[in-house]
Amino acid sequence: MNVITAVNKGRKSVRKFKPTAIEDTVIHDAIECAVHAPTAANLQPWLIGTIRKKEMLAQIAELADNGKFIADAPLCFAIFGERTAKYYLEDCCAATENLILGLHAHGVGSCWVAGDKKGYAEQVRKLLNVPEKYTLVSLVPAGLPADISIAPKKETKHLVFHETFKKD
Ligand SMILES: Cc1cc2nc3c(=O)[nH]c(=O)nc-3n(C[C@H](O)[C@H](O)[C@H](O)COP(=O)(O)O)c2cc1C
């Protein structure tokens, strides 16, 4: 298996973290992966925040209904997109996945926590003092894995078709 395939297939959502701080070089490298994602018309319409202060992590966790574990992560990324960019959502989702894989390549676990479509998106933006032209797309708490759960995956053969779709 080549390294990219191994990184892709080895990634799992991690929701329990060791308290160990993540090195700046790793954070920088993962952000570099994020900003190398493809974007429509190459607009790169994103803004990526890193949050490490415990108090702020706790406040974000309080807002995120399915992201309470953010409070116990040593680090959380917040990915925002420029509202006026037509494909900001797709662009920022690509960046989010690149970020997650970039972290995983360093052995750092993380979990995509929904931002877009969530009622708390505006509250998180205001909490982080982010200008109104941006909207929250995703939160990514990260840290060394303390526990990893394996989510079952559908069988690939049921999810693809070749040339034209045929019913079984
Ligand atoms: C758009 C999106 C939003 C998600 N939001 C949450 C979330 O709010 N809380 C959470 O615990 N996991 C969230 N997840 C992670 C999924 O639950 C996870 O990817 C899925 O269960 C498959 O597990 P795996 O990532 O280990 O393959 C989200 C994933 C995506 C792609």
Image (cartoon, helix red, strand yellow):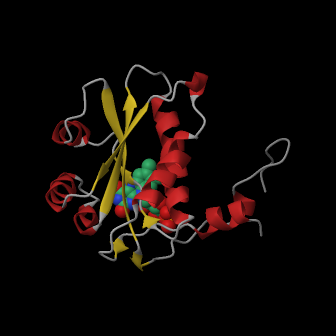
Asked whether residue 148 is in view, the answer is yes
Q: Nearer the viewer, residue 139 or 160?
A: 139
Side of 106 where 18 appears, left or right:
left
For image coordinates 38% across by 66% down, the residue present is 22
Please provide percent x and percent y for residue 132.
25, 25
Work out which quarter of the rendered image holds the C terminus and state it: bottom right
Please provide percent x and percent y for residue 68.
24, 63
| Res. 42 image quadrant | top right
Please provide percent x and percent y for residue 140.
38, 55
For image coordinates 46% across by 29% down, the residue present is 88
For image coordinates 63% across by 65% down, the residue present is 7
Work out which quarter of the rendered image holds the N terminus and state it: bottom right
For image coordinates 78% across by 49% down, the residue present is 161
Residue closest to the far front:
25
| Res. 74 image quadrant | bottom left
Rendered view: 31 above or below 69: above
Residue closest to the far top:
84
Please provide percent x and percent y for residue 162.
83, 47
